[in-house]
Image (spheres, grey):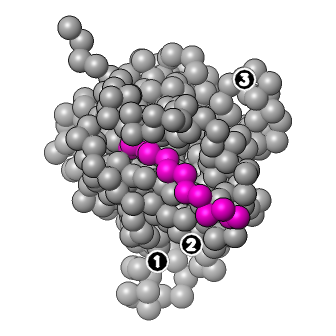
């Protein structure tokens, strides 16, 4: 026999132990949002807030129910937020002082933190409860303007949305396609999803070898989003927890609670597709984990290892809406711009001759070649940078990389062609 659902267990307890306490009332069990269990949100309810029938919320107290345990969660600021357990919510009628009690049972039903809540209330109180629920939801969406960037799994300072679109040197067509895609989703796309009764949730992947500018693109997109007062959620795997699904859940909860369009940035998507959490991640990508922000949520993920993202993600329609391959520098004009950018005032016409050699390398490599040459130049107190120093910096960096590659020979070759890159 299959184990009963947690929901059924709660329902059984309510029917056998709770509603018999109210023999004169017609009681109703309802599935409710976990928002109501957040201390932060309950604490924000105005004491004058009036509900249907002139009821006001007067507080909650824990009660006993063996079907649930009491566990707290906290937000990124360390405030206690959602809690599980059994609680009695008290509402008072303003004129008569009559008290209505609503039982709320909240519980996790999986060890990765998924939660359900059920309430038991008198049928006559449903309209007042609906007002209370709407107010809690409104408060939960009201994220203050100074927290437009939410960093999950890292310090707020670890993500700086300061890159200008123009600083990124990539094929103009590719840059335009990325920005067009993002803009089109938030302007026209969200309406299309809604008309089709789909959740407005779009997912893009930026894939490329290290150092091609993926993080720069994320940062520039974040800046673009912040200029429009959107919420930006940045998921980092840099802290001790690493790439865990809990972070994705927190990010989606922040997106769902936002009253504005939301950009979620997830670096190193491949790291979240490990054995244990893959199924959960697939649910997020195909939208069965709820991301219910009507204004639209755009997920921009990055990876160095598209080969680690299996076909179930890459090829199934609807999981990743679009994959952009972020390439190494492809033409000598771009290599020249990049070199000029990183040499700064030291740049001179004679350096142009070196650009063709840099084609085929990622931006980060070219930057390092420039920095290495500039350091050498400064060390020898030279005013101009001779081509020869660039050459030397290039060779020494290349030797280092080749030596490392020899060491790490097991790393499989990236096969972007297999992902359908046209050029
Ligand atoms: N396309 C580019 N245009 C200009 N500068 C670039 C570009 N790509 C890389 N750089 C330089 O290299 C640095 C590293 O790039 P970035 O962190 O964006 O690479 P990445 O693709 O995110 O790498 P990884 O895959 O290792 O995370 C940038 O801060 C920038 O200085
Ligand atoms: Mg990066």
Name the residue furthest bottom: 381
Can residue 339 be seen in this snapshot? Answer: no
- Give how far across and how far down residue 49 sits, in percent: 70, 64
Please report the residue visible at 51 percent of the width from the left and 57 percent of the height from the top.
Answer: 90
Please report the residue visible at 23 percent of the width from the left and 41 percent of the height from the top.
Answer: 66
Circle 2: element type:
helix
CA distance separating discs 3 and 2: 52 Å
Mark 3, Cα crowd under 10 Å, few <14 / some 14-19 / many 20+, is few
CA distance separating discs 1 and 3: 56 Å
- Apparent side of residue 20 relative to residue 229 in the rendered image (left or right): left
Residue indicated by mark 3: 197
Q: Which of marks 1 and 2 is nearer the N terminus?
A: 2
Question: Magenta residues, as a range?
Answer: 94-106
| Secondary structure predominantly adopted by residues drawn in magenta | strand
Image quadrant in which the C terminus is located: top right
From the viewer's side, name the closer residue of 142 and 122. 122
Q: Does the magenta stretch include residue 87?
A: no
Q: In this view, does 108 lie above or below 49?
A: above
Name the residue furthest front: 24
Q: Which of marks 3 and 2 is nearer the N terminus?
A: 3
- Apparent side of residue 40 relative to residue 268 in the rendered image (left or right): right
Circle 3: element type:
loop
- Give how far across and how far down residue 149 sits, in percent: 57, 64
From the viewer's side, name the closer residue of 162 and 112. 112
From the viewer's side, name the closer residue of 190 and 33. 33
Q: Which mark identifies residue 343? A: 2
Circle 1: element type:
helix
* Residue 241, picture quadrant: bottom left
Residue indicated by mark 1: 374
Please report the residue visible at 42 percent of the width from the left and 18 percent of the height from the top.
Answer: 312
């Amino acid at each position: 026999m299959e184990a009963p659902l947690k929901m059924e267990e709660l329902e059984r307890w309510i029917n056998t132990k709770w509603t018999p306490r109210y023999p004169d009332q017609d009681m109703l069990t309802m599935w409710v949002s976990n928002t109501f269990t957040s201390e932060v949100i309950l604490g924000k309810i105005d004491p004058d807030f009036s509900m249907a029938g002139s009821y006001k919320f007067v507080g909650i107290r824990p009660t006993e129910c063996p079907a649930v345990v009491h566990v707290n969660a906290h937000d990124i600021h360390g405030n206690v937020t959602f809690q599980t357990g059994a609680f009695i919510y008290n509402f008072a009628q303003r004129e008569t002082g009559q008290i209505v009690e609503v039982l709320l049972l909240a519980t996790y039903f999986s060890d990765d933190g998924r939660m359900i809540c059920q309430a038991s209330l008198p049928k006559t109180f449903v309209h007042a409860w609906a007002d209370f629920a709407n107010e809690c939801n409104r408060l939960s969406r009201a994220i203050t303007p100074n927290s437009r960037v939410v960093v999950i799994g890292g310090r707020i300072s670890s993500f700086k949305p300061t890159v200008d679109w123009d600083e990124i040197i990539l094929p103009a067509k590719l840059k335009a396609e990325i920005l067009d895609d993002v803009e089109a989703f938030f302007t026209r796309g969200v309406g299309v999803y809604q008309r089709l009764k789909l959740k407005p949730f779009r997912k893009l992947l930026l894939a490329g070898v290290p150092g091609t500018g993926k993080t720069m693109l994320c940062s520039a997109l974040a800046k673009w989003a912040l200029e429009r007062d959107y919420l930006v959620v940045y998921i980092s795997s840099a802290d001790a927890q690493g790439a865990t699904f809990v972070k994705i859940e927190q990010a989606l909860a922040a997106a769902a609670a936002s009253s504005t369009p939301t950009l979620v940035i997830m670096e190193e998507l491949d790291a979240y597709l490990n054995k244990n959490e893959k199924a959960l991640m697939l649910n997020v990508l195909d939208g069965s984990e709820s991301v219910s922000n009507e204004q639209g949520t755009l997920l921009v993920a990055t990876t160095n290892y598209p080969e680690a993202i299996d076909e179930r993600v890459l090829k199934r329609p609807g999981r990743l809406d679009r994959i952009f391959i972020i390439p190494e520098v492809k033409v000598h004009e771009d290599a020249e711009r990049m070199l000029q950018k990183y040499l700064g005032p030291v740049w001179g016409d004679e350096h142009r001759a070196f650009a063709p050699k840099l084609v085929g390398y990622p931006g980060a490599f070219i930057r390092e070649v420039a920095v290495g040459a500039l350091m050498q130049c400064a060390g020898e107190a030279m005013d101009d940078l001779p081509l020869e120093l660039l050459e030397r910096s290039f060779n020494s960096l290349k030797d280092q990389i080749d030596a490392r590659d020899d060491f790490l020979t097991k790393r499989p070759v990236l096969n972007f062609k297999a992902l359908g890159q046209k050029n």
